[in-house]
Amino acid sequence: MNNDATVTVMQALMSRRSIRAFLPDAVDETTLRQIFDHARRAPSGSNTQPWKAYVLTGEARDALSRKILAVYNDPEADKLHEEEFAYYPRNWTSPFIDRRRELGWSLYSLLGITRDDKTRMKAQLGRNFEFFGAPAGVIFVTDRSMEQGSWLDYGMFLQSVMLMARAFGLDTCPQAAFNRYHRIIAEHLALPDNEIVVCGMSIGYADLSQPENALVSKREEVDDFVRFLK
């Protein structure tokens, strides 16, 4: 484990962030297996373990990227695709929309993208479908019979994957952007009808020379969202 197993839970939590540019350095399958071997200890209601992951590297990853980008860059084809479930609110309200806008414009500012540069905005969004250059991409799915409680369990599993990646000196970016192209993903992975795409994730080594990786999203102070009752 990275740094002689001295990476603590606290360090992993505080250093985890969404990385949007990765080095091409490969991540060996043994390391990826260890990440999932530890993450499987995530809690789930009645031990249902509602998670399943497809790890893509090499041509399996590149072929999926090409298929999605071919549609993404074709307006007529792209409008035929939509999410199976609403990840974000259908009606945005404050403070949630404010936080989203702040994050978006902070990223664009680092990249030198102005508010009227729609071409570069689209290109940056399209980087999602290249897994931001990461050597490994993951598509997470669950069974369609699962209800909201199991999706909460799934979030704990995803967090466990990301924290374990930090313990091995790796970085990640969880990506809901893939959800729009669930039909392309389902065909590429030959998903059975009972499996629904939850999200994607990039895993690899951060390219710290790239400006987008200087982005650290803000968090509310504890007293803003926690009430201590005595």
Image (cartoon, rainbow, N blue to C red):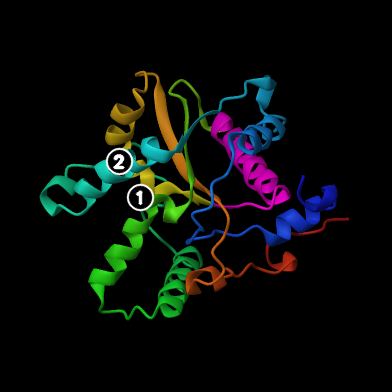
Q: Which mark is residue 181?
A: 2
Structural crowding at the residue carrying mark 2, measured as other residues with C-alpha within 10 Å and reported as few (<14), some (14–19) or many (≥20):
many
Q: Position of residue 133 (x, y in %)?
A: 43, 55
Structural crowding at the residue carrying mark 1, measured as other residues with C-alpha within 10 Å and reported as few (<14), some (14–19) or many (≥20):
many
Residue 193's place in the image compared with 86, above or below, is above
Residue 226's place in the image compared with 193, above or below, is below
Q: Amino acid at mark 2?
A: Tyr
Q: Residue at x 19, y 54 (%)?
A: 73
Marks 2 and 1 sit apart, C-alpha to C-alpha, by 10 Å
- Residue 215 highlighted magenta (yes or no): no
- Residue 164 highlighted magenta (yes or no): yes
Q: Give the left or right position of residue 31, taking residue 5 as reference.
A: left
Residue 156's place in the image compared with 163, above or below, is above
Q: For residue 161, which quarter of the picture?
A: top right
Q: Amino acid at mark 1?
A: Phe
- The answer to whether the residue labelled 2 contacts the one labelled 1, judged by CB atoms less than 8 Å apart, is yes
Q: Residue at x 53, y 68 (%)?
A: 213
Quadrant housing the N terminus: top right
Per the rendered image, the range of residues in magenta is 149-172
Q: Earlier in the sequence, mark 2 or mark 1?
A: 1
Q: Nearer the viewer, residue 150 or 134?
A: 134
SS assignment at label 2: helix
Q: Which mark is residue 89?
A: none
Q: Is residue 79 visible?
A: no
Identity of the residue furthest to the left in this view: 76
Q: Which residue is mark 1?
A: 129
Q: For residue 205, which quarter of the picture?
A: bottom right
Q: Position of residue 63 (x, y in %)?
A: 31, 39
SS assignment at label 1: helix
